[in-house]
Image: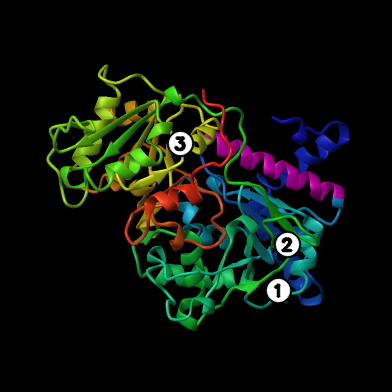
Amino acid sequence: MSHHYVVDGCKLVAVLLLWLGSSAGDKHAGRAHAAEHQEHTAHGPAGLEEVVLLIQSQRNTFHARHAAQRKVEILQQAAELGQGVPVVLLLHELSDYEGDWSILPALPHLSAFYGQSASWFFFIEEGTSVTLSALLQVLHRYQVQEEWFLGKPLYDNEASIIHHYAFSEDLGSFSYPDPAAGWALSTPLLQRLTERIQYKSLKSDFTIDLKHEIALYIWEEGNGQKLTAVPEFCTETRDNCATTFTSYLPNCGDPVSKRDVFVAVKTCQKFHSERVPVVKATWEKDAEFLEYYSDVTDASIPTISLGVPNTERGHCGKTFAILKRFLSKDVPKADWLLIVDDDTLISLPRLRQLLRCYDPKEVVILGERYGYSLLQSGYSYITGGGGMVLSRSAVSRLVSSGCGCYSDDAPDDMVLGRCFTSLGVPITHSPLFHQAQPYDYSEATQQAISFHKHWNIDPVVVYKHWLQDTQPRDEL
């Protein structure tokens, strides 16, 4: 643990007591103080003891440790402030259900255990810093008996495929919260959402862009709440901020070596002359080990045929053949496998920087996380177009399990997600990976490791603008 998180003497004792009080005793305290809470909210603003902070943590070791450090920081700050103790929860510890990351499945739990004692539920990322005194000042502006949905608003700059082109006629009419800045629900709104979840299903089985879909669900086609903009919920540091955010690309030390990453590019004959030249003109030079897998052998590229015919839809058969080849002696041994499409644009230097944070001996599958049927105990998966990163341990675990494709044209990313879910392996999300093009995301997307699709753009220009580092890096 960094020295920034070390506390000593009485301060350490205080933090540990607050930690214990905000975990083991939270559920009991939630019901025990219900009457006191109701009396307080009738006469005055909420204190910190009436705030539940939910850190949107993940089960992967790196993320769990990072979130735990954030919790210690918050409780230490509360002890120093002396204005009450908030409940601080780690999302991945709420239940055994991995789909809690999509928030809606977690709301009934939050309502049942904290709905009678809390006035506010505040959701933050692992990297979101919170100034508790400023947060209280913000929350005091709003009547806790009313329904509130608070956040830093984001807007679509163009009609977006990942948002199903919603509000394309007036993009400025709808906003959704920037999760890096934090967002809040008042208890009356959370309780109403909980009741609605129990009797009304979602319009789509897929969870694609959580922040937008949460806002749509709360808005309820105009019958619910729109997001209320809070200027003190910030990402960049400035005066009077209650929250700030650093980066989704953490600095965990020197990037892993080029030789630690094996790159598999999925292609087919009809795209050999159209897409492969883009890869060669942009990011191929940053790869030490890279192979193109196609339905035919083409020595000019070169490509490798895995004996799996090309399919028009999913590419499960090809992907599982790649997994087995990665473990064979036919390719150099590497810690990490990256599987991308031939129209994926990616920054390998940034990927290698990110991978330094993870242990390749741990079973890790990393990328942009989507969900399928998460309100009905479904599963999560890494969407393929943005790139799927697997540790060698993850590939070995999957191949040895016997889980596989039900057909060669099954969706490979979803089958991988279903298999890892059945094995109890969490899907690790990074918002740096993108299934769509840059213009399908809000202006908050300043950092990226990947984008996907070439239609209606010049992919080389997009790569140079969004993904190519202007400063040379020391290559290992």
Q: Position of residue 90 (x, y in %)?
A: 60, 47
Q: Quadrant of residue 123?
A: bottom right
Q: Nearer the viewer, mark 3 or mark 2?
A: 3
What residue appears at the point 72 percent right and 46 percent down from the top-left corner?
A: 21
Residue at numbered disc 1:
144
Cα distance between the residues tagged 3 and 2: 45 Å
Residue 256 seen in the figure: yes
Question: Is residue 76 shown in magenta?
Answer: yes
Q: Nearer the viewer, mark 3 or mark 1?
A: 3
The amino acid type, in three-letter code, at marker 2 is Glu
Q: Earlier in the sequence, mark 1 or mark 2?
A: 2
What residue appears at the point 34 percent right and 62 percent down from the top-left corner?
A: 456
Q: Residue furthest bottom?
A: 223
Q: Quadrant of residue 151?
A: bottom right
Q: Which mark is residue 348?
A: 3
Q: Residues within 10 Å of mark 3 (few under 14, many from 20)?
A: many
Q: Which mark is residue 311?
A: none
Q: Quadrant of residue 259?
A: top left
Q: Residues within 10 Å of mark 2 (few under 14, many from 20)?
A: many
Is residue 9 toward the left or the right of residue 156 in the image?
A: right
Depicted 33 relative to depicted 423: above or below: below
Which segment did they paint magenta? 60-80
Depicted 169 relative to depicted 294: above or below: below
Q: Position of residue 293 (x, y in %)?
A: 23, 35
The amino acid type, in three-letter code, at marker 3 is Leu
Residue at numbered disc 2:
50
